[in-house]
Image: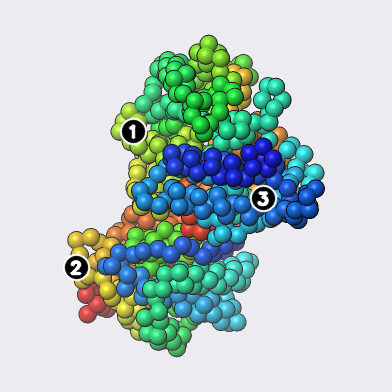
Amino acid sequence: MDEDRDGLEGSWQFVSKALRYGAGVAVHLSKLRPRGTENKHGMIASGPCGFMEIYSKFNEILRRGGTYRNGAIVAHLDADHKDIVEFINYDRSRIPWIKRCVNVDDDIVNYPDTLSAIMKGASRGDVWIVKKQYNKKGERIYSNVCQEILLKSRDTCLLSHINLGLTTIEELPKAFEDGMKFLCELHKNSGVDESDIYKKEENQIGLGVLGLANFLAIEGIKYSEFVAALRNRNSGVGKTDTKAGEAALALYNGFMAATKVAADYNMDRAFTVAPTASCAYRYLDREGFTTAPEIAPPISRDVDRDSATLGVQSYSFHPKCETAEQVGWDTFFELNSEWQRLMDSTGMGHAISMNWWSDLVSMDRKFMARWLNSPLKSLYYSLQVMENTQDKSNVSAGLDSSEFDQSEFDVLFGADNEPTMCTSCSE
Amino acid sequence: MNKYQALLSKKRVWTPVKPERFILPDEAREAVGRCLSLRFLELPVGEFIRDAGKGDLPQLEGVKELLLSNIVDEERHDLALNYIAEVSGISADYEAEAHRIVKAWIERPEHPVLKALVLERSVFFVILPLFRFLGGPGLRTTSADVSRDETVHVAANSAVCKDLGLRVTPELDKLRKATVSWMTQGLINKSDEKWYDRNFWMDQSDSLLYTGKAEGLIETKRARMPAFFEMSNSDLPSYA
């Protein structure tokens, strides 16, 4: 949003139209003057933060009034904006239907107060974080709603995902090539630039994946093995004497084949990993189980997807899927880093919507330094992934032997005071 | 690291958030309202643990720290459930009776940690799934947040009870039964849908206390994945 170019009202019109069509919108507020700033006409700025309430209301009314429509809105603010702390700490009850994202530079570590506020906000789950991004011409490009697509202002995304759960190792290269052709053709014919809403300043699409966890489970490959193989492949020392090595090579070949297709269509960017947090649940792997979202391991093999709009829906992933807790944060972080490296090696990489696991890792300066020094571009939702924390079918669920001793649960009733009442009828 | 320290490290901090108003199915309204009114037990449970701290406790590192942090947890649970009560308005009709139940628990002469354990293991362990399966989005979030804490509390209090050789008395068991019976009023005595079946919840409470297991609550093993864009920010968890 630009105060001078389109005015605030211009952005409202854009948001309104996009939401009515069921789209998601990311609104960048950094060009708005900080709160209290006086312009040449003597007008005092209210700052960018209060405007989030208007956008939240747009989403609440346009998206949720009447029938359900897919749509979402995210407000972005650069970390070097003077109102960044207000933005991060803005009361979530005043902006129930807008998410927030902070855009940082690599030197954010030199601003400890701001960094501390960002880390606290992200730890609470109130803000996401992305690194500022620039295209090959050095122009600023922005994150979309879910952070996986990088685009110029008023451009739009066009995404599709390869269901890895349905794909064998041998099929991977062709799946990527075909998927890219499909998207490129769709992009050519979308006519999006002819709408009165969007622009098409760059050629970009987003080919992503879902169901990596299912793929690995079916192929009998551990996440740690796959990450090691992918790292070797990215370093040019890939071996194919293991299943993981074969899979990494097939993935690499798929990316290269798809890159050639995308280049033929003059794409600027073409690869991504989107959250697929809605669509993954609608697909099955080749053994009939629900596909896990994107490249992450599921938080549990059985999940209740909880929506205020659609209610609670239960899904079962592949029983041999490794879970997030089993995979561990370090392996997951390295997986994302290597996947991003592979995307970047094509010269057509967008980003990965990478959730971080706030009950397995703390967001502190060390964590941030690691992320800032990595090729990763986003930190998306704060997820809690430890298993069985809600299990109430067993008093020792979720605990290991260092935390409980079964005998402690068995001694409540001594021989002299066994329960004497009938347990079923209380008589 | 001993088990008390291990349990303490298991905890994760969260912050109560006032949720959006939610609508309950008519069949669930009374039971959820009654269970919610029993939030008045949260602070007394904290007091039970505080009282226990004045007397004999196992002489192990981490015991006091763990129990003190459990008290803080109970205060957080009280705040979270008060938010739910405030937005839902469904518990007011039952609060006077709930206070009498709380009084009965306070007046029981058993060791305070034993009282806390019985309440958490066979009353709160029943209320949390009831909130999860019969409640609205914000209540489900609160249930999930409280749930992790309660697992640690039960383990901590079980360990203390074992170390102190405490046993459940028939009188305490009767009070537990009466409490669960009262809070599940409004549900049907036998329903085809188990979450609406009063007997089902009574049986789960019995089973949790007597065996430590409740096969009927197997669905609680499923993780909860909030659909973030389909929920108000006020209904989403707040960590840290």
Whether label 2 touches label 1, CB < 8 Å = no
Q: Which chain hosts label 2?
A: B
Picture quadrant where residue A412 is located = bottom left
Q: Is residue A202 left or right of residue A392?
A: right
Check residue B190 in the rendering and tell me which mark sits there, or answer none. 2
Look at the image and tell me whether residue B114 can be seen: no
Disc 3 secondary structure class: loop
Residue closest to the far front = A41
Q: Is residue B79 left or right of residue A69?
A: right
| Label 1, label 3: how far apart the Cα atoms are | 43 Å
User: Are labels 1 and 3 assigned to the same chain?
Assistant: yes
Q: Nearer the viewer, residue B42 or A60?
A: A60
Disc 1 secondary structure class: loop
Check residue A284 in the rendering and tell me which mark sits there, or answer none. 1
Local packing at callout 1 (Cα closer than 10 Å; few below 14, some 14-19, many 20+) is: some
A60 to A256, vertically: above or below: below
**Where residue A367 sits in the image (x, y, percent)?**
67, 43
Residue at 64 percent of width and 31 percent of height: A141
Whether label 3 touches label 2, CB < 8 Å = no
Residue at 51 percent of width and 31 percent of height: A196
Give the quadrant of the C terminus of chain B: bottom right
First in residue order: circle 1 vs circle 3: 3
Q: Nearer the viewer, residue A54 or A218?
A: A54
Q: Which residue is mark 3?
A: A48
Disc 2 secondary structure class: loop
Give the quadrant of the N terminus of chain B: bottom right
User: Are labels 2 and 1 assigned to the same chain?
Assistant: no
Which amino acid type is shown beneath numbered disc 3? Pro
Local packing at callout 2 (Cα closer than 10 Å; few below 14, some 14-19, many 20+) is: few
Which amino acid type is shown beneath numbered disc 2? Lys
Check residue B91 in the rendering and tell me which mark sits there, or answer none. none
